[in-house]
Image: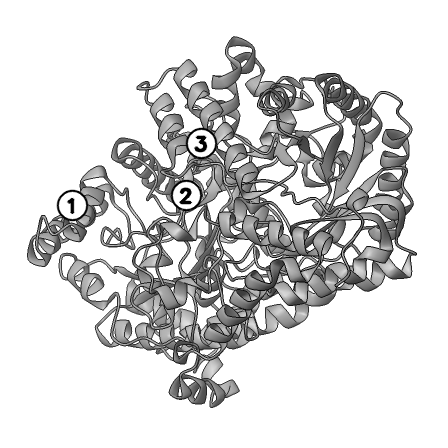
Amino acid sequence: MTPKSAAAAARATVYGYPRQGKARELKKAIEGYWKGRVDADALRTTATELRRTNWQQLTDAGIHEVPTGDFSYYDHVLDTSVMVGAIPERHRTAVELDALDGYFAMARGTQDVAPLEMTKWFDTNYHYLVPELGPDTVFTTNSTKQVAELKEALALGLTARPVLVGPVTYLLLAKPAPGVSADFDPLTLLDRLLPVYAEVLADLRAAGAEWVQLDEPALVQDRTPAELNATTRTYRDLGALTDRPKLLVASYFDRLGDALPVLAKAPVEGLALDFTESAAANLDDLAAVGGLPGKRLIAGVVNGRNVWVNDLTKSLATLGTLLGLADRVDVAASCSLLHVPLDAAAERDIEPQILRWLAFARQKTAEIVTLAKGLTQGTDTIAAELAANRADLASRAGSALTRDPAVRARAAAVTDTDTRRSRPYDERTTAQRAHLGLPPLPTTTIGSFPQTAELRTARADLRARRIDTAGYEERIKAEIGEVISFQEKTGLDVLVHGEPERNDMVQYFAEQLTGYLATQHGWVQSYGTRYVRPPILAGDLSRPEPMTVRWTTYAQSLTSRPVKGMLTGPVTMLAWSFVRDDQPLGDTARQVALALRDEVNDLEAAGTSVIQVDEPALRETLPLRAADREAYLAWATEAFRLTTAGVRPETQVHTHMCYAEFGDIVQAIDDLDADVISLEAARSHMQVARELAEHGYPREAGPGVYDIHSPRVPSTAEAAALLRKGLEAIPAERLWVNPDCGLKTRGWPETRASLENLVAAARTVREELAGS
């Protein structure tokens, strides 16, 4: 490749970086603050040190322009709500008394005030806090955070680019505030919002910003003409400002489609586009609109969402094609590196041969720098890196780990009959009600109970060999006994064993399935201070032996009430893992489904009458473009049915979903053919119950009446009120009573009180129904 001129040397940059720190220092500091062990000044000091460390790592790696403003105590969309003054009325007093405590109140709620609704950030497993807006919303400028973090970076002598959620995406992510008509369109507030963005941009320019990045990922979804017109107006008005930095509008996660010509023509100085596989059409589309003459293009050619090494040769070819389509081409990951772990080099338990295949945030940063160097100085200057990269790719492609002929043969032999229950739902429900003998409005939980410090210590002691397996198992048995006893005394109808042996709902299974790799330090933020270690699916998958049967049957031996068997479904196993990218995702899902089918059948054979297969990620993994959804939902629902269809009619199959926009997938929920589905509904005020009713959903459902992502304890009256609202949409004979989600992250005191209130609410409403 011919080097570019020095004047147009490609810069290496990223849009965001993991926030938590090498040892999750941010999580520990924030949770310490919540518990009163860390004061506000100490928390701020930790945050400042983490930002400085991140910027230094990026600079040392060769990144020319670091992002600022991507760091957050909880969520960057919540930060945007603070920046534009969109504070819900119920939180204003708390924010005015103490900005930090008010911020966390919006995120987590208090005993007296509910938090903001939380849902998934596009098709990722990151959760954001949904802005609440209405016709009376008044926006006000508060650029304190954004300006302060920019000044921090500039004081270190760095070239820095503030990153903000763009105004169009912010409004498209928002919902009508409680009490506001559901027909209210937050985008109608655009004219009020833009002056605030203008003030923020002016503040950042005054603080020394040369460029500001405005993230508009909502534009990669199907957008209406009105929404595209709003985008045109937004960047026409912002571009016309005289007191502003240069503007870079960024999109990621998919192709821009109809929004690309809108942004290409906008009076902004640059665009940042995703050019990875899911957004490959951006390349041809950019050429079709005549490129970006006179503008800067940041090319996202390194996948910011997977953990596999980049094909450097292929990326260089893409970059070479882009050279003639913009005034300058810089190199980046496809999106923020928030979605991947920090450093693969920290993994000591992964075989060196396999470790070569992996790239976490620090390795991806190095790839970006290498590509920028090759683009600027020519491929001869990176010959060694290219050779090593080709060897890494060949090592993975030729590894026996990636292919198991027996697994592939079994998957190829699946027929439609394997994905259908032997009896229709009407016949199954009659058999299940006779077999289980449950009361109206049966009560249950979603699966997990609090993961106490004692449980985490026991697992750590087992790993460190401070206790033996027998000692560890006695501790698990004792915990299961306590959980079963509590549920019986509280009056729950369908019990769970509490999952004390499980570190994570995906990792636990991944560690027992072939084809998966587990990390020790691969933490990724899910929401707030909740971090997970997604396992890595590297090869063909199978189940060598039963995974859950022992503990489920032990729990059942302690009670005469039904105990649910608990599994994580195939789509969620994939969505919350880093999956292989060398075969279609539907093929991998079928392999996972067959492994889980074996587990379901073994649970039933051991006497388990209720089996729950959780699929909270079904909506999350929904393609962002409507045209791509039919194919996805076909294999996703087939995988669930393949997992569950082999059981007898009297065995009741449950599933669970949480924190997503369910209206888009109600037909798919129906197509799962589960007997019972439990869903998040407390924060969204039973919206999903109404959506199920409008669809004519024919089976049983449990819209949650207890928001488990907040420390507050719902009262009996509050839970009963939500239950009555659920009954407006779902008849009593098909309505279950349960929390929104699992209780793993909650403490025992709040769990006891909340579940006691939940059961009391169910009894209250049962009595009302009996007396009516």
Above or below: residue 137 compared with residue 375: above
Q: Residues within 10 Å of mark 3 (few under 14, many from 20)?
A: some
Residue appearing at x 38%, y 68% in the figure: 353
The amino acid beneath tag 3 is Glu
SS category of the residue bearing label 1: helix
| Residue 577, image x, y percentages | 45, 59
Quarter holding the N terminus is bottom right
One can see residue 566 in this view: no
* Tag 3 residue: 718
Q: Identify the residue shown where x is 38% and y is 58%.
A: 506
Q: Which residue is mark 1?
A: 482
CA gap between label 1 and label 3 equals 27 Å
Marks 2 and 3, how far apart in space?
Answer: 30 Å
Report the residue marked by disc 2.
531
Q: Quadrant of the C terminus?
A: top left
Q: Secondary structure at mark 3?
A: helix
Q: Residue at x 33, y 35 (%)?
A: 754
Amino acid, disc 1: Glu
Residue at (67, 61) in percent of width and height? 379
